[in-house]
Amino acid sequence: MKLFSGTPLSQFSDRPAPRPVEKPAPLSTPATASDVAIPEPTATTALRIVPVPRLAAGGRWRIEAMRSLSEPLLLWFTRGQGRITVGGVTRGYGAHNAIFIPAGVMHGFEAGAQTYGTAVFFGRGCTIDLPPTPQHLRIRDVGPQAELSGLIDNIQREMESGKSGATRAAQHHLGLLGVWLERHVEADGTGAKKPDAARRLAARYTALLEREFRSGKGVAEYARALGVTPTHLTRVCNQTCGRSASDLLHDRVIFEARILLAETRMPIARVSESLGFTSAAYFTRAFQHRTGKTPSAFRRST
């Protein structure tokens, strides 16, 4: 089957005959469409704390493009404002917003020059009790704001101290951060509200897309797996995040391509194959259309 079938990028295909369409995988199973081994771009599994402005080092695409992580993430914005998309739903954020994103949830956000805050990466295999679903908390009171900032500062201080037991102490502070989240999610109450049908479908689509974006499937195939028409799926995505279903698909695939080009030595032809493209030439044209650079030029610039 041909990636991005029926989308604007189809004009770049040099293989007009589509590949045979396989039966869509059940929603409860992970993607198995590609047998090509994909190396992890980074082997880091440890707890990290990174200033939000530094996340965009190497290109704004690193924060704005749709992606998911294999570890939980907390974004604590202390200054500025912007928009963040989590699970196919876009919301505005401002100062003193805490946004928790579980592992495997697709997301991307804007961060302007005046945006400041901290990202807490909990590490793969984190054993801290954390919310099972995304949370967007608007912390209006000074006390809880200072408490969260203090917890993050304590974690970072221990990580940088070099003292004996520092890692264990940082984990204890991280546990207190988990308690802070639990209490404020409960007090906020929004996590208990059932999302409407559009948001549920957007979340199902992005979850399925995250599992199968390497398969080469197009929007029509995702829609069929979800039991809706491509038109309805696109309408819902436009409603929940202001972007079409194909935009989300393209963004996720090209983000992965950029990561593989920037952080691995995988040959470009293999990057193309691993992401389900019908040919390396099609991949080059699609990549250049979305980024303004060929894959080789992008790799040289990173």
Image (tube, rainbow, N blue to C red):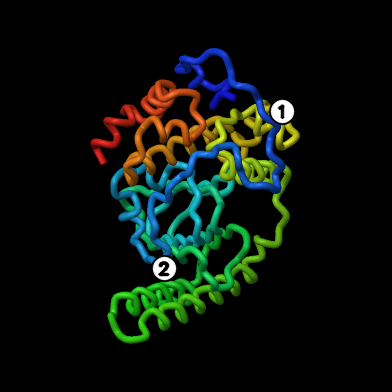
Question: What residue is shown with label 1?
Answer: 229
Name the residue located 42 percent from the left edge and 44 percent from the top edge: 64
Q: Is residue 91 above or below residue 46?
A: above
- Asked whether, in this view, residue 73 is left or right of residue 229, the answer is left
Three-letter amino acid code of the residue under disc 1: Thr
Location of residue 29 with respect to 285 vertically, above or below: below
Residue at 68% over, 32% down:
223
SS under mark 2: loop
Which residue ends up furthest to the left in the rendered image?
300
The image's mark for residue 99 is: none
Q: Residue furthest right?
A: 227
Q: Position of residue 191 (x, y in %)?
A: 66, 61
Q: Which mark is in front, 1 or 2?
A: 2
Determine which quarter of the picture holds residue 188: bottom right
The residue sitting at 64% across, 70% down in the picture is 186
Q: Nearer the viewer, residue 14 or 177?
A: 14
Q: Quadrant for residue 260, please give it.
A: top left
Q: With respect to residue 53, does 289 lie above or below?
A: above
In the image, taking residue 55 as reference, residue 301 lies left or right, namely left
Pick out the residue farthest to the bottom.
164
**Which label number is shown at residue 47?**
2
Secondary structure state at the residue bearing disc 1: loop
On the question of residue 22 being in view, the answer is yes
Query: For this view, does 5 lie left or right of residue 223?
Result: left
Does residue 97 show up?
no
Q: Residue at x 58, y 48 (%)?
A: 87
So how many labels did they put on this image? Answer: 2
Image coordinates of residue 190 in percent, x first then y, are 65, 61
